[in-house]
Image: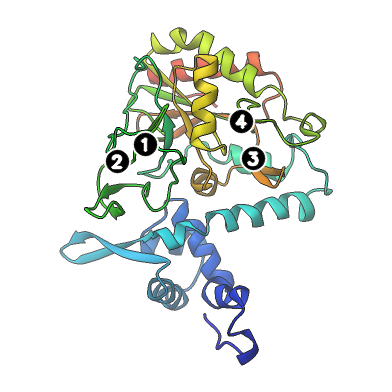
Amino acid sequence: MSRQLRAQDAQCSIAQAAAVIGDWWSLLIVREVARGHRRFEDLLGELGISRKVLTERLKHLVEHGVLTRDPYQTRPVRHEYVLTDTGWALAPLLITMQDWADRWLLGDGTLTALPESHDTETARVHGLLGTRIPTPLLLPATRPSPPSTEPGHREAAELNPQVHPQPAHTSPNLHPGATPRPDGRAQVGSGVVGVAGAGWSGASDVVADAGATVLFGYPATGTPGALPPHWGDIPGTMGCTLENRLFRDRLPEFAVEGIAVHGVSTQRPDEQAAFAEAEGITFPLLSDMDLRLAAALRLPTFRAGQAIRLKRLILVVDRLRVVRHVIFPVLDIPTAITQSLTAARAVTQGRHTH
């Protein structure tokens, strides 16, 4: 619960933030809602918290604008708890805490983009098997040129045909599940919202309307800007351009099976668009620069060049958004791509793999 601020902390933003989300349970509630556990009973089950404490913490987070209550049932009235833009702005905090603990508490302090085969990160990623990716989960996406014929790719609505000099940001104009308001801001509801730019199409769902979606995460490509100093010295960072090229070259094999391919990194949409144009990438590249996907799935990350980067992984997701196959760590990129095609083909045929 919130504490009464001391007089000397009245101008301290850290103290102000701690008064709202510094409590153990409050942070874990934000974590679980980001993961898609939005209903009271679901939160009880995930957290093992008492009903009294959960009720108090939810009330506190709603009062401070971190959560909002949305009705999902009328007789009797039942509400689910949804992160506001204020709440989603805590996603980088959650991932920073996770990254810090993975490296300094659970690891040996080494900066690496690769996990050990038996470590906590690996167990956490493989724990995604059988879980459902929250809906909606919309991220800024590149717009393939010429228009993609990839199965199930839903290009977001283009609200403004002009090219904007600044990249889109997921908040407030790209709120998951948002529809536009007359003032240009986002209103939580159904639909997709975005502003058109050069090479990107607003927001797209991370899971395509296809028989299966192969979602591959990678740290960063070196086009158009330079990578951070000593990037190549960090184990696991090299190969992002190669991975995109291999998926590009094999995309017809995926498409003929009704399988969508989505790439995701924490790079800005304009960076991804420039890379896609330069390399002829015709599947969507999604920008998780606000770390919403990373927070929703607790994806493994590392910090390099003062930026949080995803560690390389591949998820195969079915039409119902259930994760059916995980490849992590990715140690051999060509082999992993072949494995993802085999697994996704099995999913489209109704055979689940692990």
Q: Which residue is mark 3?
A: 309
Residue 5 pos. (x, y %) = 57, 87
Q: Residues within 10 Å of mark 4 (few under 14, many from 20)?
A: many
Q: Residue at x 47, y 12 (%)?
A: 251
Instruction: Tell me which numbered mark, 1 or 4, is placed earlier along the sequence.
Output: 1
Q: Secondary structure at mark 4?
A: loop
- Measure how far apart labels 3 and 4 are at the Cα level: 8 Å
- Quadrant in which residue 301 is drawn: top right
If you read the primary sequence from the N terminus, does the residue marked by circle 3 or circle 1 appear first? 1
Residue 279, position in %: x, y? 55, 15
Q: How many residues crowd around disc 2 within 10 Å: few (fewer than 14), some, or many (20 or more)? A: many
Distance between mark 1 and mark 4 Cα atoms? 21 Å
Would residue 129 be found to the left or right of residue 347 on screen?
right
Say which residue label 2 marks.
Answer: 192
Disc on the earlier residue, 3 or 4? 4
Percent across and percent down for residue 8 are 65, 88
- Residue 218 is labelled as 4
The answer to whether the residue labelled 3 contacts the one labelled 1, judged by CB atoms less than 8 Å apart, is: no
Report x, y in % for residue 336.
Answer: 62, 19
**10 Å crowding of disc 3: few (<14), some (14-19), many (20+):** many
Query: How far separated are the C-alphas under marks 2 and 1?
Result: 8 Å
Q: Which residue is mark 1?
A: 202
User: Closer to the observer: label 2 or label 1?
Assistant: 1
Compared with 353, 107 (above or below) is: below
- Mark 1 vs mark 4, foreground winner is 1
Looking at the image, which residue is at 65% across and 36% down?
A: 311
CA–CA distance in space, label 2 to label 3: 26 Å
